[in-house]
């Protein structure tokens, strides 16, 4: 099993839009920096030659400032702050951009090799950077 930690803003790979003359671009401008960060981190690791791949991803998203109290209690969460980021971005789209970036970084040859995918999105702790912890291993079914 190989584990990498990527700091940055996890970005969903959504739909593409047509800009003319057969050119398609990503809808989100955050996708390219995220994929680049994941691919770069993956390039620094030797994953070996995996036939069937298991990927486990823990996405860390920044909490909005509105979740925190104000004044001298600004470091504390409000009572009604949600425990999980149950809104945008969609978990499946975060996984899609990350799996593509892992392939670009050489973790595996083809996305089709990923036969097990475990993904979760959580809020990062106050002292923790946004990003993802990614584990890649040979699938053991």
Image (tube, rainbow, N blue to C red):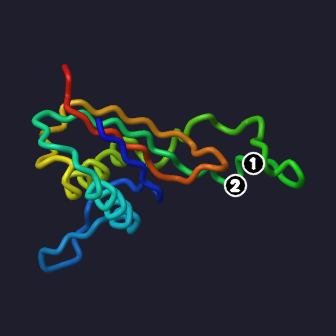
Residue 62, percent from left and from top: 58, 52
Pick the front one: 134 or 25: 134
Residue in view at x 42 percent, y 44 percent? 133
Judge left or right: residue 90 versus residue 140.
Answer: right
Q: Residues within 10 Å of mark 2 (few under 14, many from 20)?
A: few
Residue in view at x 23 percent, y 53 percent? 100
Judge left or right: residue 52 versus residue 72.
Answer: left
Above or below — where is 109 with respect to 20?
Answer: above
Residue 124, percent from left and from top: 58, 45
Point out the residue furthest to the bottom here. 21
Helix, strand or loop at mark 1: loop
Marker disc for residue 115: none
Q: CA distance from mark 2 to mark 1?
A: 6 Å
Helix, strand or loop at mark 2: helix
Pick the front one: 59 or 49: 49
Residue in view at x 29 percent, y 35 percent? 1
Q: Residues within 10 Å of mark 1 (few under 14, many from 20)?
A: some
Pick the front one: 92 or 126: 126
The quadrant in which residue 26 appears is: bottom left
Above or below — where is 8 with respect to 91?
Answer: below
Point out the residue furthest to the right here. 72
Q: How many marks?
A: 2
Judge left or right: residue 63 versus residue 138.
Answer: right
Residue in view at x 75 percent, y 42 percent? 77
Residue 118, percent from left and from top: 34, 32
Q: Which residue is mark 1?
A: 68
Quadrant (top left, top right, bottom left, bottom right) of the C terminus: top left
Residues tagged 2 and 1 counted as in contact (Cβ below 8 A): yes
Q: Which residue is mark 2?
A: 65
């Amino acid at each position: 099993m190989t584990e990498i930690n990527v700091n940055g803003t996890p970005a969903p790979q959504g739909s593409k839009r047509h800009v003319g003359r057969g050119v398609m671009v990503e809808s989100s401008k955050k996708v390219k920096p995220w994929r680049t960060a994941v691919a770069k981190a993956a390039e620094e690791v030797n994953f070996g030659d995996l036939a069937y791949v298991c990927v486990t991803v823990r996405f860390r998203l920044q909490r909005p400032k509105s979740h925190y109290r104000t004044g001298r209690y600004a470091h504390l969460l409000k009572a009604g702050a949600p425990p999980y980021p149950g809104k945008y971005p969609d978990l499946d789209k975060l996984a899609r951009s990350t799996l593509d970036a892992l392939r670009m970084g050489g973790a595996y040859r083809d996305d089709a090799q990923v036969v097990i995918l475990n993904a979760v999105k959580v809020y990062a702790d106050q002292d923790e950077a946004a990003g993802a912890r990614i584990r890649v291993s040979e699938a053991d079914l």
